[in-house]
Amino acid sequence: MKTLFRVLDGLILAFTACLTGIVMLRPALWVLIPAAIVLFLLINLFPSPSNLRFRTARLRICAEGTDILTSFLIGTVITSALHLWAAFSALPDHAAAFFLSVLAGIIVLSVAFWNGIIRVYTTSIQLGIKLRIIGLLCGWIPIAHLIALFKIISVCSKEVAFENDKLLLDESRRGHAICRTRYPILLVHGVFFRDFKFPNYWGRIPKELEKNGAVIFFGNHQSALSVADSGAELTERIKRIVAETGCGKVNVIAHSKGGLDCRYAISHCGADQYIASLTTINTPHRGCLFADYLLKKTPENVKKTIASSYNAVLRKLGDSHPDFLAAVYDLTDERCRQFNENVMDSGQVYYQSVGSRLNKATNGKFPLNFTYHIARHFDGPNDGLVSESSFRWGENYTFLTPKGKRGISHGDMIDLNRENIEGFDVREFYVQLISDLRERGF
């Protein structure tokens, strides 16, 4: 049905675009003008009744934008073909009619194009900055502008369908609260990040979990400290949550270095009595060999300069006493070997882990597309930062390898880029992860 409306809209656009020339050659057909104007307005305001099924205004507007852009392509092809034919049959006898028709066609199609492009640019999340810029730059290059437009339509169409299906899924299980665990969830970030509300380190995940009944807290710890200092800070945070809510314990979901911080908190800071479960996400439990190499090869004065610059920035972002080098050193292979010898698991806590693999460097956002090659050279297959061999910890281990060439990066695992990845729904993964904790009694 949607395809039919797009074709009909394209035909109407082509008819409206060519109407000026038609009327000039056949004045008696001027009576068609009011009807053409009404139809033109309708397809620009309400391109397809089927869009009413989408659950939010954002999705409806984005869907309408893709419909209008598709109709624009169809209308452009038909209008161009008709004017090409007219160039041979109408010129030179009807030159004025021909050129006025071309001008009217450009105006009509331009209105449709900008209507559609503004709709998708202002409502789509998946287009991203890169594709938006490519679309604007290629808009002036023949052939390239069609390729870019096809890509924009494809991305937005998939986004609308995917997001609407997610909304329908959440509506279907609204009363079940499948993420309402016995203990609340504490999300613990990795190194060099903070728990800002905007942008959220965990992307769209917290909101999705809350829609399904989860109670969420954040670590709110500093971004760059040693594992020991971060562990102590997180322990105090957990104690406050337990004291203020009376929840007794928390379920911790920790990403990257946050997993090491929490293991230390459990083993050495007394957090074991306040933590029911620890799920580590892409945590370097066995360190990173490339970190050892870089730290050994980098001159001391260079390391100190880099650390000083980072620490200055981190202070401005809210850290009271950041320590860049301490955080980095604790991620090395050597330090993690020592860590695993001295940090024992608690029998009171359920441990599990998750890992993923990035299959191509180009599919990782900066800087993971750069560090992927370094990590692969020293550590083998990795997520752009941490090797496969470093992820596993605890009773249960999940390794994510979706079909296709893309894979899942270190940042993808926390929805850092808010990207819908084919074959991997990061939000639903966390919903099922928390649902599993609920079924286990946590």
Image: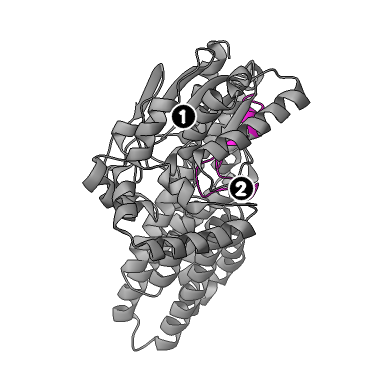
- As drawn, which residue projects farthest toward the right? 244
Would you call the spot at circle 1 few (<14 residues within 10 Å), some (14-19), or many (20 or more)? Answer: many
Amino acid type shown at disc 2: Arg
Which is more foreground, mark 2 or mark 1?
1
Q: Is residue 71 magenta?
A: no
Residue marked by disc 2: 58
What separation in Å lies between label 2 and label 1 (alpha carbons)? Answer: 34 Å
Q: Say if mark 2 contacts mark 1, CB within 8 Å.
A: no
Would you call the spot at circle 2 few (<14 residues within 10 Å), some (14-19), or many (20 or more)? Answer: some
The dot on residue 280 is 1
The residue positioned 38% from the left and 35% from the top of the image is 336
Q: Is residue 308 left or right of residue 177?
A: left
| Observer-nearest of 291 and 119 | 291
Check disc 1 and report its element: helix, strand or loop.
strand
Q: Is residue 151 left or right of residue 61?
A: left
| Observer-nearest of 333 and 189 | 333
Please state the horizontal and vertical placement of residue 322, each as a whole percent of the image. Answer: 57, 52
Please state the horizontal and vertical placement of residue 369, each as a whole percent of the image. Answer: 33, 53
The residue positioned 57% from the left and 62% from the top of the image is 312
Amino acid type shown at disc 1: Thr
Please state the horizontal and vertical placement of residue 149, each as a whole percent of the image. Answer: 40, 60
